[in-house]
Amino acid sequence: MNKNISHITRKNNLDLKISFEFFPPKSDAAEERFWNSLHRLAPLNPSFVSVTYGAGGSTRERTLRMVSKITKDTGIFAAAHLTCVGASKVEVDEVVKGYALAGVNRIVALRGDSPDGIGEKFIPHPDGYKNAIELVTGIQKLGDFDISVAAYPEKHPQSPTWNDDIDNLKRKIDAGANRAITQMFFDNDDYWRFMEKVEKAGITTPIIPGIQPIHNFTQISNFAKRCGTSIPTWLEARFAGLEDDPETHSLVAAAVAAEQVTELVENGVRELHFYTMNRSNLVLALARLLGQR
Ligand code: FAD
């Protein structure tokens, strides 16, 4: 064992930045869980908390309500996600202006997916933004926004080649994005290989790894496959047969995520974005492991 390396994660990582992603709750019970989780994670001083935007703008009001309340009640920077799906430029611009009026000037700008399914061809609204590059450009015209975009360590499934994918990322950043947050990935080598390509392309903007703790392996692996994230065979083997053993499942999930984030931090990553699924336990444990209190 390399003692110098293991020492890194035992210090208080004061320079490590973490952020959390939530989704807008659909019911009163879900909203209670949302706020419980947020209040448990808030003392970790996240650099921001983001709230997703449902397919086709289905969560438009709820996303706005959640980000405004996070900003007002906790003082944590809140970032609202926004997609181009099923809306004209005028309609999308109205949402952006609504965010600004509510004091939210951080936006995660995304193309979104076809309402027919994640893998289906994306057909833009006839008067809409066609992709995230256009959306970032449009948001920039409306004011002074801090903009994040998406990045794909395993390549976006609709990118014909790696060159197209990296070029698309570069163009989103050149259009004004301040950072990119990655799609979930489970093999860190995918992230490192991706970062080599990013560096070769001259991209210097932060690319924050998106970490997905595995609360439910079956659910996450189904979703991952639809997003183009691969499930390594070693990962499948670790969860095999644990469907009816939630206690062991959550211990394995904690160990897997701990291994992933520890290796990233030990190799120089200074910023992590956690997909919380509106739950706090596992993320809280991981943050503590990384020296965050
Ligand atoms: P883009 O960057 O616009 O591009 C997507 C793909 O299309 C790329 O492969 C690109 O090469 C290709 N492409 C772009 N323009 C062209 C063109 N003119 N011709 C040919 N090909 C082109 N989805 C939601 O619905 N709500 C959310 O809140 C949400 N949050 C997310 C947060 C993160 C951190 C991530 C990683 C994803 C999120 N998504 C969300 C999913 C996202 O909407 C999808 O991954 C979507 O398929 C692509 O969005 P994008 O912004 O990366 O698209």
Image (cartoon, helix red, strand yellow):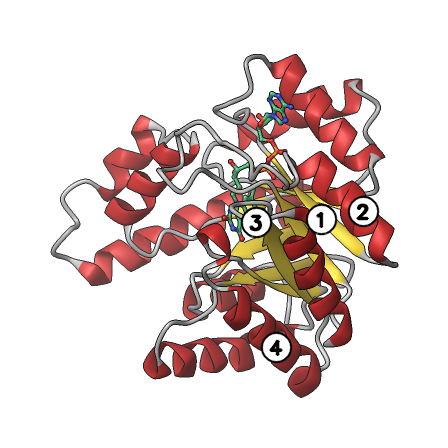
Mark 2 touching mark 1, by CB under 8 A? yes
Most foreground residue, 90 or 229: 90
Q: How many residues crowd around disc 2 within 10 Å: few (fewer than 14), some, or many (20 or more)?
A: some
Amino acid type of the residue tagged 4 in the rendering: Ala
Question: Taking the image as four quarters, which one is ligand 1 found in?
Answer: top right
Q: Earlier in the sequence, mark 4 or mark 3?
A: 4
Ligand 1 lies under 8 Å from the Cβ of mark 1: yes
Determine which of the numbered discs, if any, sits on residue 42 in the image.
4
Q: How many residues crowd around disc 3 within 10 Å: few (fewer than 14), some, or many (20 or more)?
A: some
Amino acid type of the residue tagged 3 in the rendering: Ala
Residue for badge 3 = 87
Residue for badge 2 = 178
One can see residue 96 in this view = yes
> What is the CA distance from the residue labelled 1 to the residue labelled 4?
21 Å
Determine which of the numbered discs, if any, sits on residue 64 in the image.
none
Residue at point 48%, 45% (across, down): 259
Q: Is residue 199 left or right of residue 180?
A: right
Above or below 189: residue 219: below
Residue for badge 1 = 148
